[in-house]
Amino acid sequence: MTTMTGWFRGSTIVTAVVAAAVGAVVSVSVTGRAGQGQGREQTTRPAQTPDGRPNFNGVWQANNEAHWDLEAHDARAGMVMQQGVYPYEFAQVPAAPVVALGAAAGVPGSLGVVGGDGRIPYTPEALRIKQENAEHWIDRDPELKCYQPGIPRAMYMPYPFQIVQGTDKIHMTFGFSNAARVIHLDAVELPPDYTYMGHSVGRWEEDTLVVEVTEFNGKTWFDRAGNFHGEGLRLTERFSPMTPDAIWYEVTATDPGTFTQPWTIEMPLYRRLEPSATVLDYPCIEFAEEFMYGHLRREQLVERWEGETMIVDITRKIPPGDALHDWYRR
Amino acid sequence: MIKRRLIGSLGVATATTILMVVSFTSAPLEGQAPGATPWGHSNLEGIWLDVYATPFERAPELGEREFATAEERTARDQARMVNPGRNERSQSAGQDVAGAYNAVFTSARPAGPRTSLVVDPPNGRIPALTEEAQRQADAEQEWRLMLLRNTETCQSAAPGCNGGEFGPPSPSRFDVSPFYNTSRMNRHFGPEDQSLGDRCMLGRTPDFNGFRRIVQGQESIAIGYDTGQGQGFQRVVYLSGTHPVTQIHLRHGDSRGRWEGDTLTIETSNFSPKFPFRGSGANRTLIERYTRLDADTLEYEMTIEDPTVWVAPWTVRQELKRQDDMQNRIYYEPRCHEGNYGLPALLIGARMDEQEFQAGRGPDPFSMDTATCVTGLPE
């Protein structure tokens, strides 16, 4: 019986979605083995670098639900939902793209990371677009296509990232898609084009690293809930040491075309304390190929099965304006 | 039809051989001495580039001579300038499009002092393949030629068909390729039939062509590569710890560095089989050495070993020149994938060709060369 094989072949789209969602679980390796006494040793990293700055060198990761939705939200039964028996929004059930994954495909609740009243101050038009984005999450979220995640999103995606702290530059390498950013502490010319990851210029204010991020191209999102921005986005990030192993991370976002006023998110970033913590790559371009190009194959891999074999019949209609080339030109 | 398809295939594809023309800094920069980091390591920070064009392997007639004469460098520069393939048009629209990237688009670095990037073995040539690696290379080549056999490329005995011959389409042409494909082939059933470059996954370690930005921390070092066309990548070199267990396979391997005096020595293993370098996949190990020679020169040496592919290790050496930090001319945001119209356009074109053929309105797709891009172009 080839049920399992068939199931996996048929649910390739599902797999792509879920791979993007849960990949982080396997993204950090520990080469030391349990039982050798290595696992419980504290890192001996000094709290400051020799040039007197807080020591941010190492592997870091957010540990929260911000990557799902920056705003406060209840737990949800599925990443993609549809109306169930009841008409109430709170009684929705998982929809086709994730229903085969059961309780592993839900969304955890969160108190949110947005300051003030907990809501992003969208203009009325931007709020409408945000709601549309949420409805068409699968079609529009750049993460599902393995596009550059942008800042600040890369900072709290569920993947570890590396900080390499030089004297004139600070380099961050993200597990997701091998993305990176360079924070320039010295003078540097502006990039010749707008960017996904922004242009980061930093300075030390006592023990806080303050980074101004500009030159965004407006194609990145904040999370999986459709929260977005335009080309006018400007960020001020503040990295403040809480302990040698935790950074308080604050970001103030300004974009007059999208938001009625500046707003702030804040969260701790945690050091990965495994003695051999390593940022393993999450090379997702190929993971997203079936999702993006599967319909262009000579022979489709997604099929409909019969008999005892589970049938995952996915209808994925891309709304007008959300096809790949439309998205890029937006 | 041909035009559309070729444009599709050129979208990213040609990028694999193209570097943008920029003004390289080879003159000394002022005001930035090498020195050391505050924690006492030799300072390697900056943007670095091999500003010269150097043959990867040495011409056999040069024997063990590592450096070129001034006359030889001039001759190499002149030969490149008059290479007709760089700026000529043909009578065929398809060939014309395929050759549209001329010297305006391709980088033209001056000939460098070295006769080859490979410096060991002393003859500057990569050691022989093992029997098994040669057998695999032959099988791959045989597969690619099989898919070209019914095309004009083979009919006209063009360079793209070297080693093959013209004939009817092979009955094997619908099979799954008998190896994990990473290069272009004359078939486009799905992404797997395309090259890694066409799929925006060209960057692989080691890399000798691109810009490198080194950011240096006390316990790890980041190297950002700007190579290909938006197909760069990031590496983190850990200055402590050991390689992970052998079940871990990473696109750019796991890099562990140590300081040997003022030389940074990096050992890299745990490579993924999906991103091979010259046929060497998961079994390769690298030893790289970076040494700051002066304010503007960084010596780079790389020794690669893979006993399943080559009968001996071999070594490349480059002298990298520091580029202006203020100008910051490095594309540190590889974003090929984000605008890759080429891949879906190529697949759409292939499906349309199949439909036209089935409807009796077009030629057999296997009679058209949509892979080599060099049909009939003079060498």
Image (tube, grey):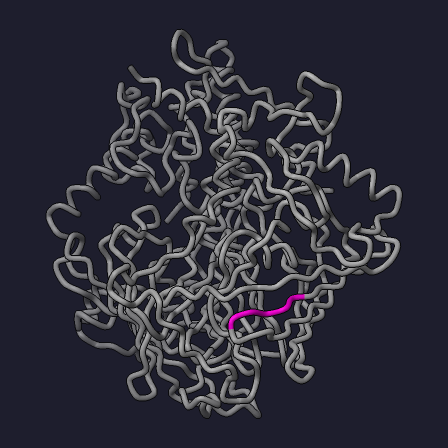
Q: Which residues are magenta?
A: A245-249
Residue A230 image position (x, y, % from top left): 77, 51
In-image side of B199 versus B151 (left or right):
right
In-image side of A67 versus B152 (left or right):
right
Tell me the quadrant of the picture where the C terminus of chain A can be found. top right
Please identify the dominant SS of the magenta region.
strand
Using the image, determine if residue A271 lies above or below residue B93. Answer: below
Rendered residue at 43%/73% (across/down): B221
Within the image, what quadrant is residue B209 found in? bottom left
Using the image, determine if residue A129 lies above or below residue B30. Answer: above
Answer whether residue B94 is visible to the viewer in this image.
no
Foreground residue among B112 and A278: A278
Using the image, determine if residue A143 lies above or below residue B80. Answer: above
Foreground residue among A287 and A194: A287
Residue A82 image position (x, y, % from top left): 66, 23
Foreground residue among A147 and B140: A147
Residue A176 image position (x, y, % from top left): 51, 52
Rendered residue at 38%/10% (across/down): A308
Foreground residue among B264 and B34: B264
In-image side of A76 versus A212 (left or right):
left
Would residue A239 be counted in the magenta stretch? no
In-image side of B303 versus B312 (left or right):
right
Residue A108 image position (x, y, % from top left): 60, 42
